[in-house]
Image: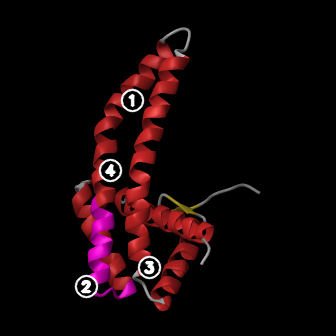
């Protein structure tokens, strides 16, 4: 398989897994759950749907643990981020240098975590057989057009 194809597949699956975790979190029952509890529930759902063996479950667990850690970090920074945006909007003129610095910090965090995330995702995906990969493709297709647990409502 070409390297570019692997990168695309890994990106789509990462977004799919993260989207699944957020989908679980968007339901009101799940909103009171901790990030760790949501990850466990997501792991159980994926494990059951794909009929994962112990090695595959371990690889999925490593991936969701890392995603959980990153999401907790993002959540902790959210309040500071909101305060920053409030200040930025009220300041006249808009401090472009400070805004660009904040964007560069966020980009650096993504770039710092990307190699590890791609490696963990690739390890999990490479452990799946053809039938399990087909199930994932079906799950992604089924979710196409859904955003935040609802069907997309686009006017045509």
The answer to whether residue 137 is magenta is: no
Please name the residue that numbered disc 3 is placed on.
126
Q: Which mark is residue 54?
A: 2
Cα–Cα gap, marks 4 and 1: 18 Å
The C terminus: image quadrant: bottom right
The N terminus: image quadrant: bottom right
Q: Residue at x 45, y 89 (%)?
A: 129
Q: Nearer the viewer, residue 28 or 95?
A: 95
Q: Which mark is residue 70?
A: 4
* On screen, residue 11 above or below 59: above
Query: What's the magenta region?
Result: 50-65
Magenta region, main secondary structure: helix
Cα–Cα gap, marks 2 and 1: 41 Å
Q: Position of residue 143 (x, y in %)?
A: 54, 70
The answer to whether residue 58 is magenta is: yes
- Which one is closest to the eye, mark 2 or mark 1? 2
């Amino acid at each position: 398989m070409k390297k570019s194809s692997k990168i695309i597949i890994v990106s789509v699956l990462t977004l799919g897994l993260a989207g699944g975790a957020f989908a679980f979190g968007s339901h009101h029952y799940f909103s009171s759950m901790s990030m760790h509890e949501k990850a466990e529930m997501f792991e159980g759902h994926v494990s059951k749907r794909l009929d994962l063996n112990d090695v595959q479950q371990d690889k999925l667990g490593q991936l969701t643990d890392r995603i959980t850690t990153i999401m907790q970090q993002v959540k902790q920074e959210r309040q500071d981020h909101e305060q920053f945006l409030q200040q930025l909007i009220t300041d006249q003129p808009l401090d472009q240098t400070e805004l660009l610095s904040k964007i560069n910090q966020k980009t650096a965090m993504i770039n710092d975590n990307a190699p590890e995330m791609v490696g963990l995702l690739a390890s999990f995906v490479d452990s799946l057989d053809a039938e399990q990969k087909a199930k994932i493709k079906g799950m992604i297709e089924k979710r196409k057009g859904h955003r935040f647990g609802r069907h997309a409502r686009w006017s045509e």
